Amino acid sequence: MFLRRIRPRGKGRRQEYWALLESYRTAKGSRHRVVAYLGKLSAKEVSGWEKLAAKVDGKAPPPAGLFDPPPADDGLGKFASVDLKNIRLRNMREFGQVYLARVLWRMLGLDALLSGLMPRGLEEVPWGTTAAILCIARFCHPSSELYIERHFYPKSALEDLLGVSPGQVQTDRLYRGLDHLLKHKKAIEVHLRQRLGQLFDLSFDVLLYDLTSTYFEGQCAGNDMAKRGYSRDSRGDCPQVVIALIVTTDGYPLGYEVYDGNTADSTTVKRIVEKVEDEHGKSRRIWVMDRGNVSEANLEFIRRRGGQYIVGTPKAMLRQVRGELTEEGWKQVREGIKVKVVRPTGGASDGASGGDKLDAGETLVLCRSEDRVGKESAMLDRFIKRMEDGLTAMSKSADAGRLRSLAAAHERLGRLREKNWRASACFDVRIQEKEGKLSIAWTHDEKAKRDLCGCYLLRTNMAEADPIQLWRQYIQLVDAEWAFRITKDELELRPIWHQDKERVQAHILVCFIAYAMWKTLGGWMKAGGMGDSPRQLLEELAAVKSGDVLLPTRNPDGSAGATLMIRCVTRPDEHTQVLLNRLGLDLPNHLKRQRLQAAGPPAQLCAM
């Protein structure tokens, strides 16, 4: 047996640790295998382990080194031998993911922020530490507070990283931690905005604003915000709340608000603009919003405050620019995407906003996507066929005498138009009654509808703006939609099981903080040339565990000695180590050393 010095490659201060190896013979020659990772050792400890290894192998001890202690003070008789056959490994815990989450928590400065906002009192566990447990659990393994208590925390290495034993993590403490955390929502949002701006040199001149909804399991009778409304999750049968999220053009979160479940999208804009100005100051920002948030009152409100906007428009407004659907004046953004500045023909009324005209300083940008042309044309074809099949069936029923009532025929036609609304305007249907018998005839002209396939309009008050740049800024709304997808799928924002109003808002705040950690990791990976998708890295780190290595020892007289427990961290494989090196992140070798028991007089353990 012998010692080997291991020096991982990486940025920052150079680290080294030691491993105890054993040599054995195979058919292909001599091989080495690791007996135990010993962590960092001093010169005296190295010498002691070398002598212990020599004694186990039955060899003479190596000659004393220049800095070894005198033989009289360091005789082999005072060293305990390790019973190699009875070395055991137990209590494997999740380490890689929680360690990375802890690094992100401290990188964002949330530990210092919450320790200042929630100073420690008489509670057994500081509320800032409880908040860290909630957010790290949401980041690593989204689950309920009961799951954190019974499964996640006992099986993770957070006990060693945070200094909180599993017995101190109960659901009641976690629930109270949610209550304390919610009180500091505004301060947390302001802090994250400043910290993320410092870390990634963010610009807050262009802000993306979008809404989503998340539903509840249960009736939520005690929560007056939980109401039924338009559900983005296709769960109109469940009460819900609406969440408005503000992100930068790169998807970094700036803030959010929670509204009643039946809140109309357009009614939230004023409150969000005032919130941003109140927390981050007034500025000539550019607001990018989807058409669902647009109303004439909202746009006028932004203009009065000196703001700028790029918004989508209702489909009905395309009819105002039908004369611009020529092949002239287009600018190519990229393959399959064309844009051009247009003027409405015969007035610029917005069919969805009561006929209000465009402001004098506004501009319309017509966009055409070849991919959307194919998709919307196929959808139109499907609805046209359904209309034709339905009208044919009505005509046969009338000819056979089964459909006799004119009122019933118009009612049936109304239902058919409602089901196939995309193609309804293409058909001109005539129902006539003659001599007690109905006749149904129709013609259809789909050219006007077909010409609009793949087209959409953008509306802005930015003077002399490049239509290509406007399109690029508007299409960044995908980052806001992706933020919702991450919080819902990766961080499991939905469904919400809490019934109390404040607990619901605290749950959403924990998801918001976890999303900030997620985006921080994505930005960190991007800076290291690793893309910006954290999921793969987290899956790789899931294989890194911590465990207790038990080293039973024997005293010089052959009696059983103390059992040495070293809580070690497994070394990542070569691929994972490359990822960690890219991040400049070094995992610790061991977390804890402890004597579990002592039988007889204690022996001196040089490695301690």
Image: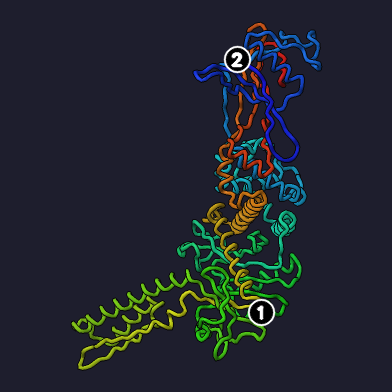
- Left or right of 553, for residue 485: left
Foreground: disc 2 or disc 1: 1
Q: Is residue 135 above or below residue 597?
A: below
**Residue 192, relative to residue 441: is it above or below?**
above
Seen in the picture, residue 211 relative to 159 is either above or below; the reply is below
Q: Is residue 510 visible?
A: no
Badge 2 local density, few (<14 within 10 Å), some, or many (20+)?
A: some
| Extreme residue in the left direction | 400
Residue 427 shows which numbered tag?
none
Describe residue 202's horizontal placement relative to residue 210 as left or right. Answer: right
Residue that label 2 marks: 83
Q: Residue at left 46%, top 65%?
A: 236
- The percent coordinates of residue 541 (x first, y second) are 59, 41
Instruction: Give amino acid for label 2.
Output: Asp
> In the depicted view, which residue is nearer to us: 222 or 377?
377
Residue at position x 71%, y 20% in the image = 607
**Residue 461 bears which disc, if any?**
1
Quarter of the image with the N terminus in it: top right
> From mark 2 to mark 1, how far is it between C-alphas?
79 Å
Q: Which of the 4 image quarters holds residue 288?
A: bottom right
Q: How is the image coloured?
A: rainbow
Q: Position of residue 358 (x, y in %)?
A: 61, 85
The residue at the point 41 percent across, 82 percent down is 447
Can you give x and y, in whole percent of width and height, for residue 467 in the image?
62, 75
Q: Nearer the viewer, residue 243 or 326?
A: 326
Q: Which residue is at 37% across, 74% downward? A: 381
Question: Crowding near pointer 1: few (<14 within 10 Å), some, many (20+)?
Answer: many
52 to 223, vertically: above or below: above
Q: At label 1, which amino acid type do we have?
A: Asn
Q: Quadrant of the C terminus?
A: top right
